[in-house]
Every structure is written in structure tokens, then in C-alpha cells.
Amino acid sequence: MNSLLIKNANIITMCNGIELYSSFLGITSGIIDYVSDKPPKSQYDMTFDAQNAIVIPGFVNAHTHIPMVMFRGVADDIPLEKWLYDHIFPLEEKLTPDDVYSAAKLALSEMIAGGTTCFCDMYFFSEQIIKATM
């Protein structure tokens, strides 16, 4: 059994505004099975001290074009139409499935680091984005 106890956590539950300070959160086999300001009676395989940290649910990004991370910084500070038609669309015409796969891997690592756990992507070469996600 894989289990983890997070102790001393400031927990924001997103459930009726409940916030617990310096509390405990237990996870067993990927499922949260304990949340309380009191220590659990059961034992966990591992313990993580989250002193001064916040535990919150993962973020959901409901509209993404994650491979566009490769265009970050391209023609900044110009009107949207000019940016798209004069800069982005010409670059996108040259993209290969491998380009999209590599860019998706980068974007996914950034999302994971930032706490995003779910996303809905609307870019082309979607099979490459799915492959990068697996």
C-alpha cells in the first residue's frame, strides 16, 4: 500500500469555505482518506512536513493551446490580428507533429510545476498532445 501523510498543512478544501490550519491530510493509493486538524490514528508509509505551505486542489485550465508555448515572446505588444496573421499563422504553417509534441512536453512540465492538474486543449495535431500527456 502506498500512503502519504501531509502534516502541518494549511488546507483550503474548496468545500463551503472550510480552511484548516496546521492540519493533516492523508492519501492512500491516490485517494484522500483523511483531513483533520487532529493527527490520524492510522499509520502512513511516508510523512511530508508542509510547514508554512498551503495544500489546495489542483488548478483546471479549461481553454488551452499548449504547444503555443514555443511562440512565447514572438512579436509581443502588437494588436491581436496583426500578431496572428503576420507572425503566428505563418509560423504555424511550418509546424510538424514533432514540433507540437516537443512544445506540448514543455508546456505540460510548466503546468505541472504551477499546479495545473487538468486541461482542455484546442490546438491542432491533437494526437501529439495526447501522446505528450501520456
Image (cartoon, rainbow, N blue to C red):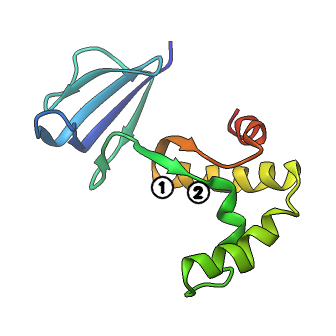
Toward the viewer: 117 or 130? 130
* Quadrant in which the C terminus is drawn: top right
Image coordinates for residue 54, horizontal then vertical, percent:
29, 50
Three-letter amino acid code at the position of disc 1: Gly
Q: Indicate the secondary structure of the residue bearing disc 2.
A: helix
Toward the viewer: 29 or 75? 75
Q: Which residue is mark 1?
A: 114
Three-letter amino acid code at the position of disc 2: Glu
**Circle number at residue 110:** 2
Image point (24%, 43%), residue name: 8
Q: CA distance from mark 1 to mark 2?
A: 6 Å
The picture quadrant where one finds residue 32 is top left
Tell me if mark 2 has few (under 14), some (14-19) or many (20+) residues whose alpha carbon lies within 10 angstroms of its own: some
Image point (46%, 47%), residue name: 61
Image coordinates for residue 78, horizontal then vertical, percent:
57, 87
On the rendered structure, is 8 left or right of 78?
A: left
Image point (52%, 42%), residue name: 119
Residue 83 against residue 28 in the figure, above or below: below
The picture quadrant where one finds residue 28 is top left
Q: Are marks 1 and 2 in contact (CB under 8 Å)?
A: yes
Image coordinates for residue 2, horizontal then vertical, percent:
50, 18
